Amino acid sequence: MKKFLAIFGSALLVITFATPVSASPGKWTVNQRTLATFAGNSTLLTNLQKQQIRATVEANPNADKFICTGIRFHSQPMSMNIMVRKRAKAACEFAKELNPELSTWFQNKPTKARSFAGKVLLTVKTPDMREQANQVTLDSEMCKIQENSRARKLGDPNPDFAGEREILGRYRGNATAFPFAPTILPTKGEIKVAFIYVDWEDLPGTSEDYEYYKQQIQMFEDFYWMASENKLRMNVQLSPDWFRIEGSYKEFTMTQGQEAQSGYAPKKQFFYDGAVAASDPETDYSDVDIVFFAIPRAKSVFFHGGPHEFNWIHNGHLDTQEGKIYDIAAAGDWFLKNDSFEPPWVYYVHETGHMIGVPHQADEDPEARMDSRLWVRNPLNGYDIMSNQGGSSRTMTSWLRWLAGWLDDDQVACITKEAVTENYFELFPINQIGADTESLVIRLSDTKAVVVESRRFDEYFDRKTRNSKDGLIVYTVDATKGSAQANQVLVSPRDITELISEPGWRDGYELDAFFFQGDSVVIDGIQIEAYSIGKESDVVRVTRSLSAGVDGEEEPESHLVFENQGREPDGETFCGCCGCVPDPAIH
């Protein structure tokens, strides 16, 4: 909802537009808007004006002051004061009907803005709880729930693979809860990436393609620098020109099945060998951790997402003069032909996440993959780049950032279910580097937690959308689920099963999960409320729920929390986002 800000001068009212502001730091937050125009000399509220007042009251459930100001153009006769004052009185009386607890006040003021003459300005004041926020936060270790899934059990060894080249068969998959399971690659410091351009005689590379990929790899670098809180730098070196692979590009085309990470993959290795033969004489692969290959976009070569390997699951490799490399990716048609909403850089980010140990978020178990319900198949869909890299919110959850060591412990507010009374927490948007508190974790049990984080639309990374991306998101974390078992599940303040339209996305719909001011939800007896959504930070109120609704009926809780815990898949083969593997635990 758009907010209209009015700044009062000593004598005249000047109207401008703005987001909610703090009227008196530590005392109040103020939200303001003007009502629709009155007809003629009428002082009666129209249905539209009543709807606007109702929306304002509902959007500010914690407000205790509601001021209605009738606006008179400064040169109009003083008799106009009576009419605009009556309009203001009618607006405040209706607000009082909607919320009897409100303290209302009506008045009139002059303005030099002719377009606002005769209108009514609503000013809603809510106690500013930021000074009281984050006063109750426990030792962060209490909220680091331990993974106990089919992939790894409590007390399992967590090897340090640093310095090794590949760990096939020895790595149990990306961790979904603490402790983080490192691969051979670091999550802090620097990763050396070689970006190699390859083409064919009948599919030559162009300068336009070169610049296109250059922009994509810059986005990739910037994303990890942001998400890691400037703790992980991707040091990317681009080949100076295109390297020519012998033969026709048609000899190297691949279907989705031929791109898979397990089984016999001769066409994939054929491409890797051809690319190395073309580039190795002029490329120093010493100390290179990851290799991305760029291909011309004019024709289809890789018919699906593109071939890729991880150091811990692969059926192909690069055999360079300097040694073998197992972390590889090359974008295919899925990204090259749909770059308006799913460009290659999101693919590089997603697959690199798995290479360094960040888990997949969609549910890739066979029964879930066959489920047509989006909130079951991919319950974080569109809100995390590790669940669906084509979503409009191209970021990583604060839980994944904390798990990887990118968020420091003092950037995470921790509280247990038992410690909740009436607590307030101020959260800063997760893409803001170095913010004080970027995540609230509520520990429910040894294996369950609820996470709350602040989001803002990021014009650099996010895909443009008509749906607001400014608010809070709430999701559960289930440590009994492994990677690709949907261990993070979004919770909606409305109905997660009612999808919202998203025309810019290939599916046309996305999950409705943002919490705007006043929205709340009850999870396991704990009520989580978006107390205030501010310009720079948000305040969350956490209380114990009475779990009683109208006429004594129990208030319904989120029906998607912790469903299908720790289930085992059917059969011995598991196919997910990143290929088919014989053991689902190492996806």
Image (cartoon, rainbow, N blue to C red):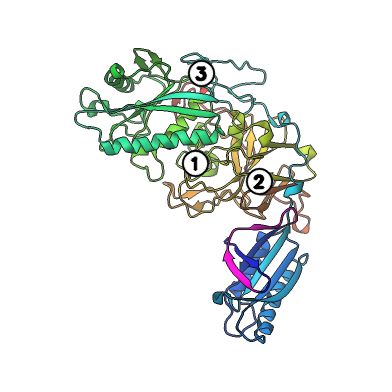
Q: Nearer the viewer, residue 211 or 277?
A: 211
Q: Which mark is residue 192?
A: none
Callout 1 crowding tier (Cα within 10 Å): few <14, some 14–19, many ≥20: many
Task: Look at label 1 and name its amino acid.
Answer: Arg
Badge 2 crowding class, 10 Å Cα cut-off, few under 14, some 14 to 19, many 20 or more, is: some
Q: Toward the viewer: 34 or 90?
A: 34
The residue stretch that appears in magenta: 12-27
Amino acid type of disc 2?
Answer: Ser
Name the residue that disc number 1 marks.
394
Q: Tag 2 or tag 3, which sits nearer the N-term? A: 3
Reply yes or no: does residue 440 show up in magenta: no
For residue 421, side relative to residue 298 (left or right): right
Q: Amino acid at mark 3?
A: Ile
- Cα separation, mark 3 vs mark 2, equals 39 Å
Q: Position of residue 149 (x, y in %)?
A: 62, 25
Q: Say what secondary structure mark 3 lies in.
A: loop
Q: Establish if 535 lies above or below 73.
A: above
Q: Is residue 76 left or right of residue 99?
A: left
Q: Nearer the viewer, mark 3 or mark 2?
A: 3
Distance between the Cα atoms at labels 2 and 1? 25 Å
Residue matched to label 2: 558
Q: Nearer the viewer, residue 222 or 416?
A: 222
- For mark 2, give the secondary structure: loop
Residue that badge 3 annotates: 184
